[in-house]
């Protein structure tokens, strides 16, 4: 089979060399041997089981970019990219460790106290704690300033009331960063991030595991807080009201990570489709021998190459500390749009078989759609880019 990692035949960027390449190989092997054989089961159960999370932690695939002193592997986003790409190339996109690794854990690293880092990061690295971040509410999606969840200080505790929805890892997560208002009168400046260890609190309730179009193996849930009490020491940052700034500072990495999943699926879709059209025959010859097939794949490979080069440049800039929010928004929207286009065209080249669930391209078609929605819709990305003009 054509390798998704080599489908574009590009030289590796500097950030993907040496130990990052070895990590990719290890992650690819782990996903192929430990997750892929059970993936249909995970899709049916609508979650990857906790045992798999613990195995990923034992294999060094959780918190790869966290410092070694806190139980991580001391890497960078390049290492997280290698893991996410391996997930995409193997086709187990519903395993939510990307969010755990490069969205949840960094909030603790960047804004947590030394005590918080030592308490939480090692358990996130082993999989003992599974992370989620609760931003979206029934009435507030891409507009984070519109959250209604309220945290009121009561002695040395916060009393939290509200609800969240579309929360990735929501059924399994026992470590949730909650976006809440500590002072509703101050708007964005009244927003704070508070950590909830769900095994230790009362007033926390999980709603249903939401029935989604795709990414079936990833648990996505409603969460409810009913006079839920957590220690004031679970506030991220040295004072209240820093949450919105913290979110804005971390969103570029979240949006780049969505681009990681996009380029990985693009490469896998192309690899599988090229193999398919070489084997499948119509009118006495292989599908690849038709000019339309060659032209379509030529266009897709060209656009995928442009996407990979852009993505690699974004990672290089991000590792150096120079990925600005506008460019990250470009990466999120353009790569996820391209993902949808490539997967759709590849499904068409499969003909009727592309519409059958037993073919991987059908699952990719379903799984790709949400990429243009979460992390801020692509329309919001264009709005952010437009403001920079």
Image: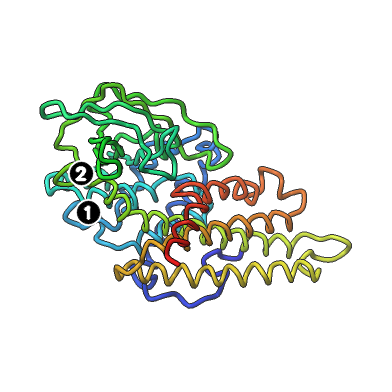
For residue 199, side relative to residue 358 (left or right): left
* Horizontal relation, residue 170 to residue 305: left or right: left
**Residue 223 appears at what percent x and percent y?**
38, 29
Image position of 369 with respect to 343: above or below: above
Mark carried by residue 110 = 1
Q: Earlier in the sequence, mark 1 or mark 2?
A: 1
Give the Cα distance between marks 1 and 2.
Answer: 9 Å
Mark drawn on residue 308: none
Q: Nearer the viewer, residue 368 or 66?
A: 368
Residue 341 percent across, percent down from the top left: 63, 58
**Looking at the image, is 265 positioned above or below residue 362?**
below
- Which residue is denoted by mark 2 in the rendering? 236
Whether residue 28 can be seen here: no
Q: Nearer the viewer, residue 212 or 164?
A: 164
Indicate the secondary structure of the residue bearing disc 1: helix
Residue farthest toward the front in the current orientation of the protein = 185
């Amino acid at each position: 089979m054509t390798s998704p990692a080599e489908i574009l035949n590009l030289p590796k960027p500097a950030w993907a060399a040496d130990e990052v390449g070895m990590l990719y190989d290890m992650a690819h092997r782990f996903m192929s041997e430990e997750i892929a054989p059970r993936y249909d089961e995970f899709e049916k159960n609508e979650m990857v089981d906790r045992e798999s999370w613990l195995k990923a932690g034992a294999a060094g695939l959780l918190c790869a970019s966290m410092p070694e002193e806190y139980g991580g592997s001391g890497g960078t986003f390049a290492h997280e990219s290698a893991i996410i790409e391996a997930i995409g190339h193997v086709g187990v996109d519903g395993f939510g460790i990307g969010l755990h690794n490069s969205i949840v854990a960094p909030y603790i690293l960047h804004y947590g106290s030394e005590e918080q880092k030592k308490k939480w990061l090692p358990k996130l690295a082993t999989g003992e704690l599974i992370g989620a971040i609760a931003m979206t509410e029934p009435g507030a999606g891409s507009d984070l300033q519109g959250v209604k969840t309220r945290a009121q200080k009561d002695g040395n505790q916060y009393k939290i009331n509200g609800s969240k929805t579309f929360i990735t890892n929501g059924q399994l997560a026992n470590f949730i960063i909650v976006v809440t208002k500590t002072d509703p009168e101050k708007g964005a400046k009244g927003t704070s991030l508070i950590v909830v260890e769900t095994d230790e609190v009362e007033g926390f309730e999980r709603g249903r595991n939401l029935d989604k179009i795709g990414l079936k193996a990833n648990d996505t849930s409603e969460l409810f807080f009913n006079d839920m009490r957590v220690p004031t020491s679970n506030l991220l940052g040295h004072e209240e009201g820093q949450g919105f700034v913290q979110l804005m500072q971390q969103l570029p990495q979240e949006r780049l990570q969505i681009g990681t999943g996009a380029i990985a699926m693009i490469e896998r879709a192309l690899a599988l489709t090229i193999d398919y059209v070489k084997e499948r025959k119509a009118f006495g010859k292989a599908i690849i021998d038709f000019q339309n097939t060659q032209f379509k794949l030529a266009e897709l490979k060209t656009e995928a190459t442009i996407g990979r080069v852009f993505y690699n440049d974004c990672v290089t800039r991000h590792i150096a500390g120079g990925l600005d929010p506008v460019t990250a928004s470009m990466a999120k929207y353009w790569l996820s749009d391209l993902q949808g286009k490539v997967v759709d065209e590849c499904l068409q080249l499969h003909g009727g078989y592309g519409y059958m669930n037993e073919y991987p391209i059908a699952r990719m078609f379903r799984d790709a759609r949400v990429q243009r929605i979460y992390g801020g819709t692509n329309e919001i990305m264009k709005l952010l880019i437009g403001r920079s003009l």
